[in-house]
Image: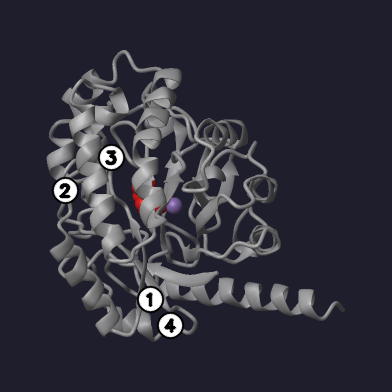
Amino acid sequence: MEMTLRWYGTGFDTVTLQQIRQIPGVTGVITTLYDTQPGEVWSQDRIHALKAEVEAAGLNLSGIESVNVHDAIKVGAPERDQFIANYIETLENLGKEDIHLVCYNFMPVFDWTRTELARKRPDGSTVLAYTQAAVDALDPEKMFDSIAGDMNGTVMPGWEPERMARVKELFALYKDIDDEKLFQNLVYFLEKIMPVCNKYDIKMAIHPDDPAWSVFGLPRIIINKTNILRLMKAVDDVHNGVTFCSGSYGTSLANDLPDMIRSLKGRIHFAHVRNLKFNAPDDFEEAAHLSSDGTFDMYEIMRALYETGFEGPIRPDHGRMIWGEVAMPGYGLYDRALGATYLNGLWEAIDKSHKRPL
Ligand code: CS2
Ligand code: MN
């Protein structure tokens, strides 16, 4: 595996490449062209400049998160073929720049959903949190307004103001789309892009839906072992792969995370590893990465990745806000650096005990 950090780019991220470079064992970043819209073609020039900037700081550009998928593709609208052609052009330009990993999601309307961006924990840190009761009480059109005040002046992925201004229109677009239609539209998209992925060896890595159930009545499909394995079979090509996000699949306590990792052997191209602390099955908060701070056994998650021969980039996912840092919720420097260090420690221990059994 390669330990990485997500980086939103100069001008968007409060964290610098120079800071990331000083986290022990972090050799790459996962980044994006944050100011592009879904459906837009990414020019080779811009990709080249991004890569040059990252490499000049002594880091690898280890993958893209995300190249977002236009809603026309998700709902299967007549103009989807044009948007797929644009996506293919972007992949082609990424391939020419020697980039081989693309994370994306297929969630309708919202990317991840949290009901609090700054829940205070007993130690004074603040974390992202979710309560079903809060979602049930909320008008989806008000979702953005209800959390906007806690974004610390940043623009959060999937919650761009331009997108949220169109939320009503977006809901209307999905009115006739159920889980099965969404699944078929995803398969259609993947089949069309596989040739370019094969040509440039680009591994597509779908990010799970977060939380792993339907919110506001919208369809959600990348939520459990059955569905993700069905997708792997439907387009049975190694370039159709997975971002294994423990914090997203883990929102459902029915998901056995190490077992899912083992069953996806060979198809996990990217891993997001973080812990959650459940107060009730439908009330959780994003704890520190350490196993004992939350509900998951992080050692077992890392061990499953190790034992299935995982070789891709891995990153700590959302961190807590600590030590007075002001940053995009979930994406500060300090707690993600602690997370990376902890995950690297687990990996080293697992590696050594495999090589020299106790
Ligand atoms: C990320 C997702 O911040 C997060 O929760 O894991 O936003 C992820 O980047 C997207 O869903 C991938 O397209
Ligand atoms: Mn994730």
**Residue 323 disc label:** 1
Q: Residue at x 43, y 63 (%)?
A: 319
Residue hosting label 3: 69
Count residues near mark 3 (Cα–Cα under 10 Å), then give few for <14, some for 14-19, many for 20+.
Answer: many
How many numbered circles are shown? 4
User: Which residue corresponds to the image point at 27% horizontal and 76% vertical from the top-left?
Assistant: 54
Observer-nearest of 44 and 138: 44
Against 10, residue 132 (above or below) is above
Q: Which residue is mark 2?
A: 41
* Spatial separation of the CA atoms under disc 3 and disc 1: 36 Å
Asked if disc 2 is less than 8 Å from ligand 1, the answer is no
**Three-letter code, disc 3:** Val
Along the line of sight, which residue is nearer the eye, 154 or 179? 179
Residue at 34%, 35% (x, y): give it.
192
- Residue kind at label 1, given as amino acid type: Trp
Q: Given the image, on which type of amino acid does mark 2 rest?
A: Val
Q: Of tags 3 and 1, which is closer to the observer?
A: 3
